[in-house]
Image (cartoon, rainbow, N blue to C red):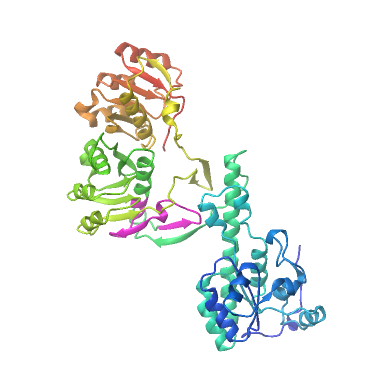
Amino acid sequence: MAGPSHDPALYRHRDTVPVRRALVSVSDKTDLLELAAALAGAGVEIVSTGSTAATIRDAGYEVTDVASVTGFPESLGGRVKTLHPSVHAGLLADLRLEDHEKQLGELGIEPFELVVVNLYPFVETVRSGAEGDDVVEQIDIGGPAMVRASAKNFANVAIVVSPASYPAIIESIKAGGTSLTQRRDLAARAFAHTAEYDRAVSTWFAEQTLEGAGLPQHLTIRAERLNTLRYGENSHQRAAIYTRAGGHGIAQATQLQGKDMSYNNYVDADAALRAAFDMVKPAVAIIKHANPCGIAVSAPNALDEIASAHLRAHECDPVSAFGGVIAANRTVTLKMAENLRDIFTEVIVAPDFEPEALEVFKLKKNLRVLKLPNDWQQERMDVRLVSGGLLLQDADRFPDDIESVAKDWQLVSGERPADDDMTNLIFAWKACRAVKSNAIVLAQGSATVGIGMGQVNRVDSCRLAVERAGDRAAGSVAASDAFFPFADGPQVLLDAGIKAIIQPGGSVRDEEVIAAARAAGVTMFFTGERHFFH
């Protein structure tokens, strides 16, 4: 539908616009009183709503309530306040046109030259863990309408959506008015602000759909560039790190020290989080080239649990751990930092660090130390770009009550193991999710002792895991992220002295695989669920 048209010759030039009347309605009260003082000092009429009006009035400044402008009281619990012609005509009137100016006079409506609006805290409400109607009530309707109306009419109205813009606006008011260039810039920021707000709302609704009936028909992903990186995966590739609104992952981590993060550092750090934070007990994962070279939880009765977990993870493959990326799912202690003193490490990421640990890390100036955001959590959805589009799926997660789930795993060979061995099997099953497929993990005492990953056949992954484990393979348990298509892979494990195997099952040759395990007297579980990681 075409919008209204006007003869360009009818437009009168307006560059500097004096501010005589301002509409102020904000949820974020930061620096509000400084702005109100400047407006009042310049003789600007302040029109406001609800708590904003109360805050300004309580500070001793005169305020005109919106209800007195519209002649209609705030209603429906505040849902309807500014959605009225007496407000929006004052926002949208283009005073470069004599006809608009005349109509305002006939209607008895005064124009606004300044609008200060920021929207209900929808994103903050979602981040707080609120759900349902509590979130829906934070979807602003009148605010975006005022912002968009004012931004469209930037030739006459300055629209401010952030307290960061208050100082410049105050200076402009003191200087006699806002300039056309300033108003156009503010309008661009305003449209970006409402676009991001709408994206956050639509994403939340899409996530509700994902948790309910299915995947959304339309998906909008918007991110802002945080930093330009030196280069990408290789030195000839350009790269940057972007953050998305509502994100709470590695992109939102705070770097406490060290060289700038690289593209590969971010990839490896994210993979390390995936591995360490699957574990409930204090755990450490060491990553090299996006694959674990060691994952472990703390030893029983360890005096320093996270330091214990690190040492046990490092013992899996000390050679590959050189230049690795480490994630810990607990606060990094002084003891763990001291254990790392002579180990070359690229990045360490954790929820927090003891001050004494940070002092030790200062001696390793190039070590990148990242602190996770307080609201860090694993993503609920995975997105991957492909040429011409993207793939979306539920994130591969383990249930919180996996111990209860394990009771229903199908025992197809041998006897159900004792509690300690069962705990070790559960650990191995979790660990294999973090390993690139085809994945084989050997574990003892809830620590990896051998990992085979990324091979194009499962037999080679078995051989690689056994080779890396060496003498530690005997008596360990094995986990496979997907079923064994033949008995040759399990036979490699059985020949190495594995005492239990956990795998999804589902191969047409399952009976051959089960027969091999039974012949060796080895316990084997089928989980009925695979954990490919490509």
Q: Is residue 178 visible?
A: no
Q: Is residue 338 left or right of residue 139?
A: left
What range of the chain is rendered magenta?
A: 240-266
The image shows residue 187 at horizontal and vertical percentages of 60, 72
Q: Position of residue 54 (x, y in %)?
A: 62, 71
Q: Is residue 484 above or below residue 446?
A: above
**Residue drawn at (31%, 16%), measured in percent from left and top?**
522
The furthest residue to the left: 342
Q: Is-magenta flag for residue 341? A: no
- Write down the quadrant of residue 407 in the picture: top left
* Figure check: 222 above or below 343: below
Quarter of the image where the N terminus is located:
bottom right
Is residue 270 rendered to the left or right of residue 339?
Answer: right
233, above or below 474, in the image: below
Looking at the picture, how far across and down is residue 59, in whole percent? 57, 77
x and y percentages locating residue 282 in the rendered image: 32, 40
Q: Is residue 64 left or right of residue 370?
A: right
Please indicate, yes or no, whether residue 163 appears anywhere in the rendered image. Answer: yes
